[in-house]
Image (spheres, rainbow, N blue to C red):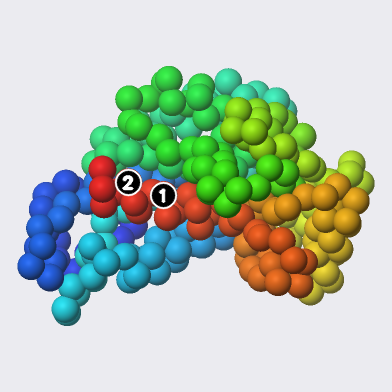
Amino acid sequence: MKTIQAHVVRNAHRAGVPNKIGGVNIKTKAIGMIGGLSPESTLYYYRVLIDLCHRMEPLKGRHVIRYPDIIIYSVDHDKVYSLMVDGKWSDVASYLAGVFRSLEKAGAQFGLISANTPHAVFNEIQVQTELPLLSIVEVTCKRVVESGLTKVGLFGTAMTMEMDFYPRVFAECGVSVIVPSPTEREYIDSRLVNELSIGRILEGTRNEFVRIARRMVSEESIQGLILGCTEIPLLLRESGTIGIPFFDTSAIHAEAALARSVTG
């Protein structure tokens, strides 16, 4: 397995060692990220993390921006996807736990998966590695609860929409999760696999996603929409035309990761 150091910091430092920015000593924890599920979403995560660094006050100095160590392990998408489709979830958990162990050896101090669907076995992965992991589902749930909503829609892969790992966590916080109809789920999943995961952004697909969301607002009374696949924000960025907030799980996850890196 190959671990890649994904970001070059202007002033080289070891993970966890204080660095003085703007007269203030800060230290960051190294982020270990499983990428490749898909490569497009991995790029989006990295871009969001770097943009957040530019805006986070503790990381801003007079002449330099402090970036935390980010270690990315880009896995074989087809291998993991095939295991998930075949229902071999214990193998998914074992494989990804092994990747996290490699990230820990490379210096990561906590980890995350830059994809939603593998979170179906998040707990199983966590018990197989000593590296603390950050759940995309839990941090998204926290954001929805903070927004005061009690009923939200969920877009994602067919597995994400049809399995219970989102509704289960949200139900514990008093929030209902509503998914599209079977036909709509099939359409969303096919567009994710055949277009968005390979970087194809088509206006017709965007329009249909918006139509489905509007139907769920009018017929299901959803108050917000979880963009529960890390490629969906590449397609749906603005929620103004629908009238409900979007919850970009990738951006929420990345923001929580940076906050943990800075604050511990």
In the rendered image, which residue does mark 2 sit on?
260
Element type at marker 2? helix
Amino acid type, label 2: Arg
Q: Amino acid at mark 1?
A: Ala
Return the residue at label 1.
256
Measured as percent of width and height from the top left, residue 188 is found at 80, 52
Which residue is painted at 61% across and 55% down in the image? 247
**Where the N terminus falls, by quadrant?**
top left
With respect to residue 52, does 87 lie above or below? above
Front residue of 49/104: it is 49
The quarter of the image holding the C terminus is: top left
Q: Residues within 10 Å of mark 2 (few under 14, many from 20)?
A: some
Q: Residue at x 86, y 47 (%)?
A: 220
Q: Is residue 207 left or right of residue 223?
A: right
Label 1 to label 2: alpha-carbon separation: 6 Å
Depicted 132 relative to depicted 221: above or below: above
Relative placement, left or right, of 246 versus 139 is: right
Asked if the residue under mark 2 is in contact with the one under mark 1, i.e. CB atoms within 8 Å, the reply is yes
- Residue 26 in view in this figure: yes
